[in-house]
């Protein structure tokens, strides 16, 4: 199905013979990497082509980035490549330096991608995590912290924005970057 929905530029689309997107290609790549790790057969040539396309999409001048969602797509490509063991530490640092205008979900993905580098920069991960936690709303109920939403949710309908997915990305980043942080339990409950 992924092969049939891949356009001539190597980007995966929602349907065959339609225009693909970097965001969806990153998701498909992550799925195939996970399937391969689980011992399922994966088309290596298709995986390599997707990695090449996602590497190109890390560039800010990549022509197929969705207008208004450039950071979200670039970060999705970075995280996908990190999960496949092919992330560029230079692009990870560059995107980490640009997290302030990014949606919360993308900030979480930058933290996760940085944490998955062969030699993570703990200081840089800490800076990104501080920004990430500033975007998580926590309230006190009966003297205990409770999850009260993310600072921002939204985006183009083409990237299927949702608080649930954003929260899952925040929890994945927090659990990876700071597994003993007590706020992680609040996120899990949320």
Image (tube, grey):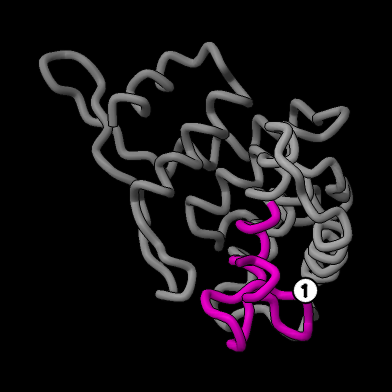
Q: Could you tell whether 124 is left or right of 181 in the image?
A: right
Q: Range of the magenta residues?
A: 1-29
Q: Could you tell whether 174 is left or right of 42 in the image?
A: left
The residue under the point 24% across, 38% down is: 148
Up the image or down, 2 lies above or below 131; here it is below
Q: Quadrant of residue 161?
A: bottom left
Total residue callouts = 1
Instruction: Tell me which secondary structure the magenta stretch mostly adopts.
Output: loop
Residue 77 locus on image (x, y percent)? 71, 59
What residue did someone put label 1 on?
60
Residue 94 locus on image (x, y percent)? 79, 55
Up the image or down, 73 lies above or below 116; here it is below
Q: Could you tell me if residue 124 is visible in this image?
A: no
Q: Quadrant of residue 76?
A: bottom right
Residue 72 locus on image (x, y percent)? 59, 63
Quick one: 69 or 94, which is closer to the camera? 69
Quick one: 169 or 42, which is closer to the camera? 42
């Amino acid at each position: 199905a992924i092969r049939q929905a891949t356009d001539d530029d190597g980007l995966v689309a929602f349907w065959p013979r339609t225009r693909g997107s970097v965001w969806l290609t990153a998701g498909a790549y992550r799925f195939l990497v996970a399937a391969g790790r689980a011992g399922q057969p994966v088309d290596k040539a298709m995986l390599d082509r997707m990695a090449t396309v996602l590497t190109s999409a890390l560039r800010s001048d990549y022509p197929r980035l969705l207008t208004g969602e450039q950071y979200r797509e670039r970060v999705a490509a970075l995280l996908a490549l990190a999960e496949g063991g092919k992330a560029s530490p230079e692009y990870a640092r560059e995107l980490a330096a640009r997290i302030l205008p990014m949606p919360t979900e993308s900030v979480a993905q930058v933290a996760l991608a940085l944490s998955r580098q062969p030699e993570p920069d703990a200081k840089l991960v800490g800076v990104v995590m501080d920004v990430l936690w500033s975007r998580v709303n926590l309230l006190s109920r009966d003297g205990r912290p409770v999850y009260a939403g993310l600072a921002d949710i939204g985006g183009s309908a083409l990237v299927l924005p949702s608080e649930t997915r954003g929260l899952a990305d925040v929890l994945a980043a927090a659990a990876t970057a700071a597994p003993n942080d007590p706020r992680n339990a609040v996120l899990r409950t949320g």
